[in-house]
């Protein structure tokens, strides 16, 4: 049985909407809300896989995490749906590499509390 997304993608009119091109020189073709997507991922993450750090949710929803998620989304979009998008993919990889690190006071190894 097809999922709702698979059914919507198989519809010709909707597929044309999905396939809008992405360019790093223009505004993205769709509004993506990384905060909502990351909160959904957190909600479905099994508790045994969550780090013990009380800062985990704060870090997951930080500006850096949201930027990284957006760049990764558009990189995947280009790699999968856009032929000849090597320039966009390269630019997005560069942007992902430039996302600043978390402040040292908030960074903690997975499974450990942050330093005080």
Image (cartoon, rainbow, N blue to C red):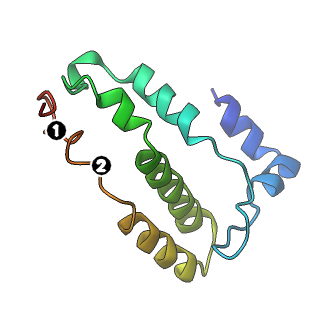
Residue 24 horizontal/vertical position (percent): 63, 73
Q: Residues within 10 Å of mark 2 (few under 14, many from 20)?
A: some
Residue on which the image places disc 1:
108
- Dot 1 lies on which element? loop
**Which circle marks residue 102 in the picture?**
2
Q: Quadrant of residue 107?
A: top left
Left or right of residue 53, residue 33 in this image? right
Q: Residue at x 73, y 45 (%)?
A: 9
Residue toward you, 12 or 80: 80
Looking at this rendering, what residue extends furthest in the top direction?
A: 47
Q: Residue at x 42, y 50 (%)?
A: 64
Q: Residue at x 49, y 28 (%)?
A: 39
Residue toward you, 108 or 43: 108
Return the disc, 2 or 1, that comes first in the chain's sequence.
Answer: 2
- Dot 2 lies on which element? loop
Relative to 72, does residue 78 appear above or below in the rendering?
below
Left or right of residue 20, residue 72 in this image? left
Q: Residues within 10 Å of mark 1 (few under 14, many from 20)?
A: some
């Amino acid at each position: 049985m097809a999922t709702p997304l698979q059914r919507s993608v198989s519809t010709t009119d909707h597929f044309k909407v999905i396939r809008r091109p992405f360019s790093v020189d223009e505004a993205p073709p769709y509004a993506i809300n990384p905060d909502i997507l990351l909160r959904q991922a957190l909600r479905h993450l099994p508790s045994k896989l969550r780090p013990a750090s009380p800062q985990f949710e704060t870090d997951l929803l930080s500006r850096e995490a949201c930027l990284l998620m957006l760049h990764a989304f558009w990189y995947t979009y280009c790699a999968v749906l856009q032929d000849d998008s090597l320039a966009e993919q390269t630019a997005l990889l560069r942007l992902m590499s430039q996302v600043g690190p978390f402040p040292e006071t908030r960074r903690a190894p997975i499974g450990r509390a942050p330093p005080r």
